[in-house]
Amino acid sequence: MRIRRILAALKRTTDSSTPGRLARRVLAGALCVFAVAAHAADCPPSAIASLAKLGSGVRNGVDRGMLWRIERDGRTSWLYGTIHIGRAEWVRPGPTVQKALAQSDALALEIDARDEATARVMGQPADPALLSRMLSGERARRLDRQNAEACVPPGATAKLQPILQVSALAGLVARADGLYPEFGVDETMAVSARNGNKPIFALENAADQVKALTGDSEAEETEQVDAALDELESGKLRGQMKELADVWARSDADKLARYADWCDCLRTPAEQRLMKRLLDDRNPGLADGIERMHAGGKGVFAAVGALHMIGAQGLPALMAKRGFTVTPVLTSAQAQTAVPMPALSAPEPAPRAVRGGKAVKGQKGQKVQKAQKGAPAAKGANGAKSSKAAPAPKGAKAPAKAAAAAPKGKVRR
C-alpha cells in the first residue's frame, strides 16, 4: 500500500544504465527507477512493444483524470490530478485536458524530470555504509528476488537510497496489466507542452521529494523498506495498482476522496505519518508555487499526483481558501471510450497539367480522365474537381459552456 501511495503522490524518472544518467528516461513513473530490463520470455512486454501493439488501432485521446479550473484576478489556471503510470492508449491527452493546457501559459509539475539538477539529485548514490547496514542478509536477498521477478538487471539500482530501490519496483509490477511508468501522465503532459513550445516549471525540488520519502530516521526508512517488500511479496500490489489506475481513468473523484477507506494503508501510526508527510505536508508548498505563478501573470496548468487533490488539505480546497474560484471540470465517474483514428492512406496523384489535350513532357504513364458528361466540375485550380470537407458526424457536440461564476473562495459543486 505504501508503494501505491507513492505512485499517486510522487514522481521520479530514471535511467538505471549509469548513475550519471539516472532520472533521464522519458515517460518514467512515480519515484520509480525504470530499469532497462532484459526482456526474457517470462518478462512482461516492454513499453515500446505495448505501444506497437496498438498499430493502426491508435485512438484519439479521451478525457481522463481529475481536472479543476481555478480563477482569480481575471485569469484562469488549472489543477490536474495525475497518476505516474499509464497505458499506451493514454499517451494522447483528451480534448478537454488538451484545450486547458493549450489555453495556459505554462505547465507546472512536481519536478521536471529532464532538468539536469533534478537528475543529479535523484541519481546520487546513497551512503555505502547505510546500504551495508540496511541491505544485508535476508533483506538484501528479498530485494534481489523481487528485482529478478521484475526483470531488473542485477545491480541496476544497487547504489540508490534503499527506499528508492524498493519503490523502483512499484512502476514495474503492473506491466502485466498494460500499465507502464514510461506512459506516466505527467510526462505525457510535458511532451504536449514541449510540442507547443510551452515553458515547464517545477513546483518542488528533488531533494525535498527524496526527504519526504525516506523519512526522518534510518529506523523509519528501514521499516518502510520492509513494509514495501511485504507488499511486493504478497502479490496483492498488482491488483491494487490496477484499481487505482482504473479510478483515475474514470475521473472518479468521489472514490478517490474515499481513498483511506479502501486503500488499506492507514492501519498503523507509521503509515499515517507517511501519508501526512507525502501529502498534507507537501500540499501547501505546491499551492504556494501555483499561486505565485498565477499572481505573476501566468495562467498555469498544474499537473501533480491525484492524491494531492483530495480532502480538506487537497489543492482544490487550499486554492479556494486563497480566494480562487474553483470549478470541477472532470471529476465524475464516467465510461471512457475513444474512436479509432482514421487510417492514413496514400494521397491520390494530382491530375497532370495538359497543354492542348496532350500530357506535359515528363509526366509519363498518366492519363487525364475527362469529367463525366453533364456533371459540372466543382470550382478549383485548373478546373480540377475539389473535395468537400467531410461533414461532422451526427451527434457531435460542441464543448460545454463554462458554468456560471461562483463566489470567489468557494468550490463549485
Image (cartoon, helix red, strand yellow):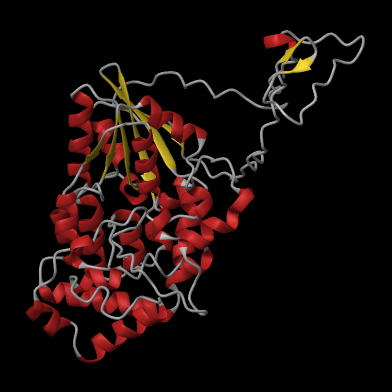
Q: Residue furthest front?
A: 361
Looking at the picture, tell me which residue is in the foreground, 352 or 404: 352
Q: Which residue is more in the foreground, 125 or 338? A: 125
Please tell me which residue is depicted at 49% across the width and 47% down the height of the picture: 252
In this image, 94 relative to 13: left or right? right
Q: Quadrant of residue 213?
A: bottom left
Position of 168 with respect to 339 (left or right) is left
Indicate the position of residue 138 as horizontal and vertical percent values: 25, 91
Quadrant of the snapshot with the N terminus: bottom left
Give the left or right position of residue 28, taking residue 86 as reference: left
Mark yes or no: residue 380 visible. no
Residue furthest toward the bottom? 137
- Residue at 37%, 42% in the rendered image: 191
Q: Position of residue 41 (x, y in %)?
A: 52, 79
At x 18% / y 52%, what residue is drawn?
118
The quadrant in which the C terminus is found is top left
Q: Residue at 63% of width from left, 40% of height from top?
A: 341
